[in-house]
Amino acid sequence: MNHVNKLRVVKGYRPFDRRITFMTWHPKKPTVLAVGSKGGDIIFWDYNEPKHEHMINGQGPGGSIQAMKFDVVDPSKIYTASITGLVCKQDFYGRNTQVFLETDNKDHWYTSLDVSFTGKVMLAGDNKGYVRILSVDGEQISQIRLHKQKVTHAEFNPREPWLISTASIDHTVKLWDIRNVKPKPEALHILNHNKPVNSAYFSLAHGNRLLTTDQHSELRIYEGPLWNHTRTIAHPHRQFQHLTPIKAYWHPLEDIVIAGRYPDPNFPGYTTAELRTIDFFDADTGKVLAQITPHFKNGIISLNRFDAIGNVMVSGMGWDILVWKPFYPDGQDEKEDDEPTKFKEAETPEHFIKKKRGGGKTKKID
């Protein structure tokens, strides 16, 4: 945890003309990530480079990327779910796009996605409460209504690939055994919430905890194998239409919760001019371990993702991607690229890299 307190923004990048909606790290290239936008654009970016190498151009309004997952077999390809009503596997080199699902209806779209490469199965949730189960090649296995309203999240457990979580605006999170999902399925566990739920992430370190984020002011932690509710963390992150939903996430190596803060005057303990920080919590105690913020801009930070070794973190703040690294001013850091001068430059607005949509080298996928 010591290095979390030392995180500083080393780079900011604005590749889109609409806000960021999803981010995911490349499974084999530790400095590369994919970032999706509300307009449907997706970039393939090595954060050591000033600009992205490839872009999949979206349709603009109505194209919002809701979920993505790299193909571990061919990491030049990525699975996507979007408000266009499509679930696809797209190629950053523009060679091929495979469409697996298409609603062909502007009032029906896909909201969530996950892929188990171990089980060779894919999940896709929609805004009607249905979850489609497909093979990784796109063959549809089943279509089942698991919630009464929009499915906001669907995920495989990283240690037990038969176990899946789904979250919904119907105020519930449900756990399922994918081996026993039938036309009229029974959930293994139903976890009721007071508000609609944005996400339900299994812990990355062990898979034995579940972290949920509602649409107002509660983060909850459940613990397996019985998935008992062990902790509620009061945290302001209310939602409104023009904000990418705040979704708390896990540190990859420890059970530490990471969540962007949206101060609320009606929230207990609110103070005037309260900062929009990234908050780190101990999952065991619920106590705040650290709060960090980029000093040059006080935006709402909706998404945060550490790399696999927990050293570099990327954040989505409106239209901007922030790259955080630990800074050791006394020379303790062994990394040559973490020099104080680079932090000083990157943390001022005039050094923020800003681009118009479609800049850099792009490859359009038709």
Image (cartoon, grey):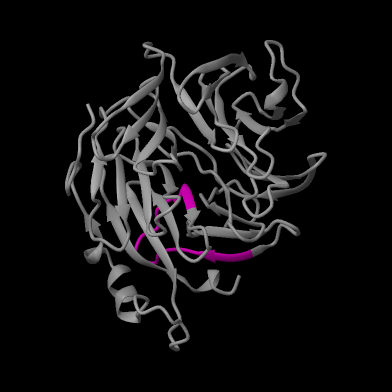
Using the rendered image of the protein, determine whether residue 195 is visible from the camera's viewpoint.
no
The residue at 25%/27% (across/down) is: 59
> Which of the 4 quarters of the picture holds residue 314?
bottom left
Please tell me which residue is depicted at 37% across the width and 46% down the height of the picture: 34
* Viewer-side residue, 263 vs 244: 244
- Closest to the observer: 32 or 38? 32
Residue 296: in magenta span: yes
| Furthest residue toward bottom | 330
Q: Quadrant of the C terminus?
A: top left
Residue 341 at x, y percent in the picture: 30, 80
Residues drawn in magenta = 289-304
- Left or right of residue 299: residue 218: right
- Judge whether 102 appears above or below 288 on screen: above
x, y percentage for residue 214? 61, 38
Residue in the image at 25% along x and 51% along y = 52
Compared to residue 99, the image places residue 92 above or below, namely: below
Q: Quadrant of residue 50?
A: bottom left
Residue 151 vs residue 275: left or right?
right
Question: Residue 131's spot in the image, x, y percent?
Answer: 57, 20
Is 258 positioned to the left or the right of 190 in the image?
Answer: left
